[in-house]
Amino acid sequence: MSTIECRKLRKDYRRGEEVIHTLQDVDIDIHGGSFVALMGPSGSGKTTLLNLLAAIDRPTAGTITIGGRDIGTLGRNALAAWRSANVGYIFQLYNLVPVLTAYENVEMPLLLHALSAKERHQRVTEALELVGLADRYSHYPRQLSGGQEQRVAIARAIVTRPTLILADEPTGDLDRTSAMQVMDLLVRLNKERNQTIVMVTHDPSTAARAGRIVHLEKGKIIDAAEFERAAQIAASGAHR
């Protein structure tokens, strides 16, 4: 499985004359086949880091090497092809196309690949069965519960058989039962398929299901001991 190496990663945004340093000199290694949860307060850079790993956005400075390839050196077309072949992205709000069935939503990424109709059908069927929605092929998003919609979104993310799954608050809009089902599924994908998963979450119980938790604060990664100290200070201040 592909190892991710980020070195001196920085991402800046301009808001008028102001420069916002969303990520600052981030160094992180994520081993292939691992399950990593990114935690931190809003604005700490979690989703920014996720989007850089997905090659949805480009860093201001620094490098991202995945599987030995510096993705920052790829041109637009090569980058799109790399992303399509290697990355599955799970959104908090599902991002399903409302006029398409569950089957058609899952099939969409495969239309960019040189596969026959038979091969596409086999992959879509396999993905929907894996997420437990074999009986919902022809249902539209409005006919599904929130948990079912998210599982369709997961099927869409894995149908291309990517090496890397990126999930942005995948349980954030779900009730506890649905959230547990989604996390059970992600853990299963990680353990049984050895797929690398990087997940953003605010929920400690969700993060605990991952094999490793990385904390970000003001665009920087902080170690576990420093995080615990900050949490204890915050808790003592709240109880005064």
Image (spheres, rainbow, N blue to C red):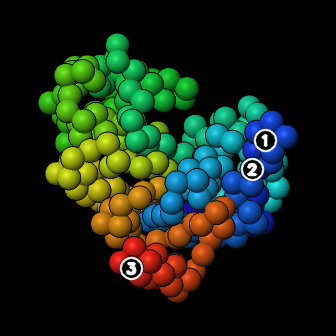
Instruction: Of the two numbered discs 1 and 2 on the same chain, state the one appearing first in sequence.
Output: 1
Residue 57 is situated, as x and y percent measured from the top left of the image, at: 69, 42
Task: Please state if 111 lies on the left or on the right of 68 as rendered.
Answer: left
- Residue 25 rendering spot, x and y as whole percentages: 76, 66
* Left or right relative to 150: residue 116: right
Q: CA distance from mark 1 to mark 2?
A: 6 Å
The disc labelled 3 sits on which kind of residue? Arg
The residue identified by callout 1 is: 14
The percent position of residue 202, horizontal first and vertical second, equals: 41, 58
- List the residue tagged with mark 3: 240
Q: Looking at the picture, does residue 228 appear above or below residue 126?
A: below
Specify few, some or many for label 2: CA neighbours under 10 Å numbering under 14, 14-19, or 20 or more.
few
Comparing labels 3 and 2, the label whose residue is closer to the camera: 3
Query: Disc 2 designates what residue?
Result: 20
- At x 39%, y 36%, the residue is 93
* Pointer 1 or 3: first along the chain: 1
Q: Which residue corresponds to the image point at 54% horizontal and 45% vertical from the top-left?
A: 87
Q: Quadrant of the N terminus?
A: bottom right
Cα separation between marks 1 and 3? 38 Å
Can residue 201 be seen in the rendering of this structure?
A: yes
**Closest to the observer: 127 or 223?**
223
Identified at 69% across, 54% down, the residue is 22
What separation in Å lies between label 3 and label 2 (alpha carbons)? Answer: 33 Å
| Dots 1, 2 in contact, CB < 8 A | yes
Amino acid beneath label 2: Ile
Q: Residue at x 70, y 66 (%)?
A: 26
Residue 69 appears in the picture as rendered: no
Instruction: Name the disc covering residue 63, or none.
Output: none
Secondary structure at badge 1 equals strand
Tag 1: amino acid: Arg
